Amino acid sequence: MQSLRRVWRHFEEGMIAFLLAAMTLVTFVYVALNNLYTMFYTLSDKWAFSRDIFAGIGDHLMEYAQEMTWSIALTKALFGWLIFFGISYGVRTAGHLGVDVLVKKTSKRMQRLLAMLACACCLAYAGLFLVASFHWVSAVLAAGIGAEDLDRWGIKIGHIAIIVPFGFALVIVRYLEIMYRLFTHRQIGLGLADEAAEASKLAHPGEEQH
């Protein structure tokens, strides 16, 4: 089980890193092409002896830039996937630390009860959205509507929207794990990681060796 959890964690972190890298790369190439062809046109105006060469390069770069209108749509799709992977990742890394500052001032027993109540609410919320998004994605897939500027590769809106129910399913799995740990007294907070403890270790690296 521990090895499976490690594999999933690496996959989750790898997907987030891949999505961020892909968004950055696509945006960089699009911006670079839009700035490079103007530079070659400027050079062609300054140096008459090589005007045709620089102008030809500028024409090709401008053509590539104009064909990359799909880059904006792809970046939006990747960002949507990043959001839903990030929700699950935020649950695992206790990204809600600022929310439970007041809760931590109560007794350990009260903290655990409040965490169980909050966890049940999160499960209900994610469950409702999972069911609703599943029906929505099913309808969109059945309609076969092509994604804007991405349908040239056969990508449909439904293919992009699959991440919505999948993301909420990941959230449910995370909170089920938290609920189990709360019931078995393995933790008293709502997260799968203690962000405050991690910050303390980074601030005082030598303490953990004592």
Image (tube, rainbow, N blue to C red):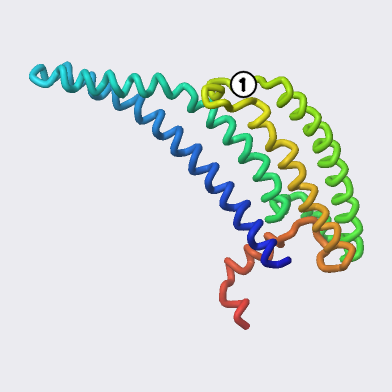
Q: Indicate the secondary structure of the residue bearing disc 1.
A: loop
Residue 182, image x and y in percent? 86, 62
- In percent of width and height, residue 130 lies at 80, 38
Residue 79 drawn above or below residue 201:
above
Instruction: Reply above or below: 14 against 52.
Output: below
Q: Residue sitting at 74 percent across and 47 percent down? A: 170
Residue lying at the far bottom in this picture: please name it. 210
Residue 50 x %, y %: 12, 21
Query: Which quadrant would residue 189 be assigned to in this image?
Result: bottom right
Please say if 114 is above or below 135.
below
Image quadrant where residue 160 sits: top right
Q: Given the image, on which type of amino acid does mark 1 rest?
A: Gly
How many numbered marks appear? 1
Disc 1: which residue: 146
Q: Residue 27 versus residue 56: which sits nearer the camera?
A: 56
Viewed as shown, does residue 144 lie left or right of 21? right
The C terminus appears in which quarter of the rendering?
A: bottom right
The x, y position of residue 10, in whole percent, is 60, 57
- The residue at 89%/49% (across/down) is 120
* Drawn side of residue 104 relative to residue 145, left or right: right
Q: If the image is split into quadrants, where does the N terminus sit?
A: bottom right
- Residue found 16% across the figure and 17% down from its top: 52
